[in-house]
Amino acid sequence: MSYVYAGYGITLAALVSYAAWVLRRGRSLPR
Amino acid sequence: MSERSALAPALGTAAAVALAATVALGLSLPETVEQGPYSRLIAIHPGLAWASYLAFGVTALASALWLWPRTRSQTADLVAGASAEIGVVFTALTLLTGSIWGRPTWGQWWVWDARLTLSALMLALYLGYLALRRVPADPDTRARRSAVTALLTVLVVPVNHFAVEWWRTLHQGRSLNQLDPASDLDGSFIVAMLVGFLAMTLVYGWLLLQRTEVARREDRREDAALAEALAERRREAVLTP
């Protein structure tokens, strides 16, 4: 089961991290 | 409120809800005789692969729109670049989750099977595309060479998709074949997989809106910096007799 949790965990962590990076980058640039 | 600013929160909320539903459905799937608990990865792995194909398809479409004089716009070029970057994230996750699925079921983290090798090649090609976009050039030159590259690179996508049918591979057949009524896959697995497809599509759509806007701001900042540097040089030229 640990492989299943690893698959879900890595996917969620990567998507959330990438989304956060995009939002942070957007806020750091003038409109 | 602009169209984009109204759409982004709605799409973001829908994506978050669909992603939560995917996780809940996927983790509650029953164990199977062949794979035990590992078949629960069906809710995320095919959806990630689908989103990577979608992203690279949009990159190709936006590139074609840029190359066609009547539809040429800066937005098409920015969408192409943004979509390729998101596609790279989805492809990397497809490879990672596939590898995690392969270890307990195949006994291997990696095999040089046609589907896996082509997926790795697809990742390498689009990383190259993103590197090409970063080579300094004026916006038109960047857009033109990126668009031509994208239209050539996208050829790997259908080859990768049909690889499991064209070659003998360790990887299972196309996930979409499971939708056939003759498929012996239990309905709950099909539902979880389809919710996963929907979730990854919504996540992709939201990311594309956000990343395209960021790319637009990056370009604007570069233009402003260039204009400032040129003005500075002109001032120097006037001051220096």
Image (tube, coloured by chain):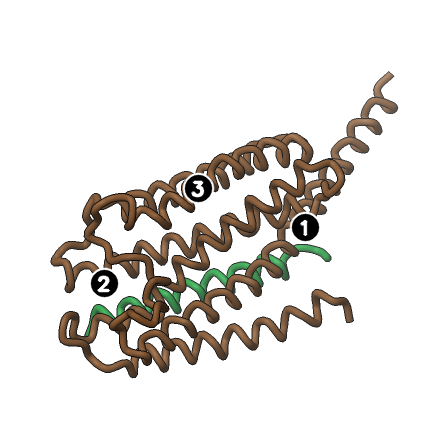
Q: Residue at x 14, y 71 (%)?
A: B34
Specify whether B219 is left or right of B235: left
User: Which badge, 1 or 3, is on the more N-terminal residue?
Assistant: 3
Q: Residue furthest left?
A: B107
Which quarter shows the C terminus of chain B? top right
Would you call the spot at circle 1 few (<14 residues within 10 Å), some (14-19), or many (20 or more)?
many
At label 3, the amino acid type is: Leu
Q: CA distance from mark 1 to mark 2?
A: 38 Å
Colour given to chain B in the rendered image: brown
**Mark 1 vs mark 3, CA separation in Å:** 20 Å
Residue B127's disc number: 3
| Helix, strand or loop at mark 3 | helix
Vertical relation: B67 (above or below) B206:
above
- Chain of the residue where label 2 is placed in the rendered structure: B
| Chain letter belonging to callout 3 | B
Q: Badges 3 and 2: C-beta atoms under 8 Å apart? A: no
Query: Callout 2, which amino acid?
Result: Trp
Circle 3 residues within 10 Å: few <14, some 14–19, many ≥20: some
Residue B13 in percent (x, y) is at 56, 77
User: Is tag 1's residue or tag 2's residue first in the polypeptide sequence?
Assistant: 2
Snapshot quadrant of residue B237: top right
Q: Which chain is green?
A: A
Kind of residue at disc 1: Arg
Disc 3 to disc 2, C-alpha distance: 24 Å
**Quarter of the figure that contains the N terminus of chain B:** bottom right
Q: Which mark is residue B101?
A: 2
